[in-house]
Amino acid sequence: MSRSNLRLANFPKLSAGLGRPRDFRLTFLGTSGGGGPTPSRGCTATSLTTFSDQTWLIDCAAGTLRQIRRVQPSIRLKNIKRIFITHLHSDHVMGIIDLLKARLRSDEDPEHQSDQANIHLYGPPGLRQFVRMNLDMTFSELHGRYTVHELRHADDPASTAPLHELRPDEVLGRDIVSGPDNRWRLFDSERDEVFVDAAPLVQRVPCIGYVFSVRRRGPISQLPLPAGNLETSDGVGSEQSIPEWREAPMKIAILGDTSDASAIAPLAMDADAIVHEATNMVSDSERGWQSEEAARDNALSRGHSTARMAGDFARSVNARMLFLNHLNSHVADVSSIRLPTFLDHRRSVDSALGLLRHRHEGAELTDSVKEQAGRGYPGEVVVARDFLTYVFSLNEDRVLVRCMNSD
Ligand SMILES: [Zn+2]
């Protein structure tokens, strides 16, 4: 029996009223690794637009605002309601302040008159202080309100962001403590049936992976709900408000930098898509790079993964698709490299040949990184590039996948 048939067999047909498609629109806004942005890739940021037209960002590197403006109106700043941060390395967070300033720019927006937060940020301990200090030190004033919820373990030290330093544009966020299963339940939306769960990843610094899933109300609860705190759509936690939910019929897991994602595997099981970093890769002797073993050792020593490790993880959770991001700076996005033409008189022959070589190497390495991930994983591997967009549509019990901008 195929994997999709297995999944269908687990879900009895649901009653009427669920006929309209429910989409997750996944867009890569930055796909370069920690070496910094390259001519063809920005640093890490990914967006997920849900079927209520809310857009959520997962990481927000420097330049993310520019990337969003390049894809407007398919992503609207006003619709960005939540930002999920995986960890506090600079290649994942330095765009937050610019994003907040642009998102909460107008004091005439009636939404900004509310005492409630207009945008929620989630992330590891220290995020609240990071945002507060950077807003303070850049003399930034927001015309709406933001809030930061920190994902903590019970034995983490106390918050480094004292209450008396709360900014006038800040609503005090929650400290969400992991349950005995070492996971966080961030919130479920009563209206949208979209859940967000999280679990720690092995990295050199505290790092988090997020799982976004659509579940359905019903009498059968096939998955034990993770223990821990709960934030409902109105921001009030209450164990009593948990309805019974069926197993997720659509699920996307977006992970941060990691050398070992096994702690999130139970949450990511049977995901329709895994977004996994592939910082390190094997290369051939011609470039004087690394063997598979050396690449793996190098990745492990720095809290990262090779493409092969990403593939192994995707197979371990029976994922339908694997997207590779956080790529080596040599893996150029060839679709963004414009080749010279006969009319391009300004280019010297040398620079034109350099461009051709760069494009050829980028294509070769993109194929290679895909092939390396595929050695351990039989599903579809996609080497992400900036602005690549996939739509996952849940229709009845089936998830249909479409690429919106294939080459
Ligand atoms: Zn990184």
Image: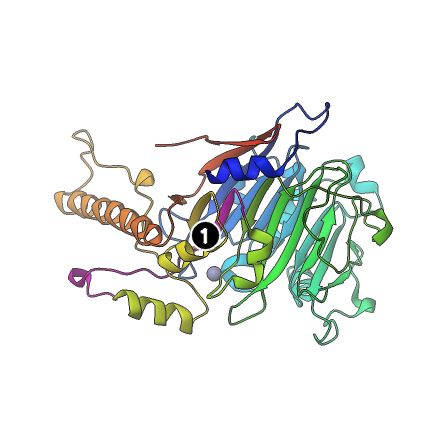
Determine whether 65 is above or below 328 in the image.
above
**Quarter holding residue 333:** top left
Percent x, y of residue 70: 49, 36
Q: Residue at x 78, y 41 (%)?
A: 112
Viewer-proximal residue among 178 and 112: 178
In magenta stretch: residue 274: yes
Q: Magenta stretch: give its range.
A: 270-289
Q: Residue at x 52, y 33 (%)?
A: 391
Percent x, y of residue 250: 59, 39
In the shown orientation, is residue 305 left or right of residue 270? left
Q: Is residue 238 visible?
A: no
Determine whether 141 is above or below 165 in the image.
above
Q: Main secondary structure of the magenta part?
A: loop
Q: Which residue is mark 1?
A: 314
In the shown orientation, is residue 5 left or right of residue 197? left
Q: Is residue 65 visible?
A: yes
Q: In the current view of this chain or complex, which residue is farthest to the front?
A: 1
Q: Residue at x 64, y 64 (%)?
A: 124
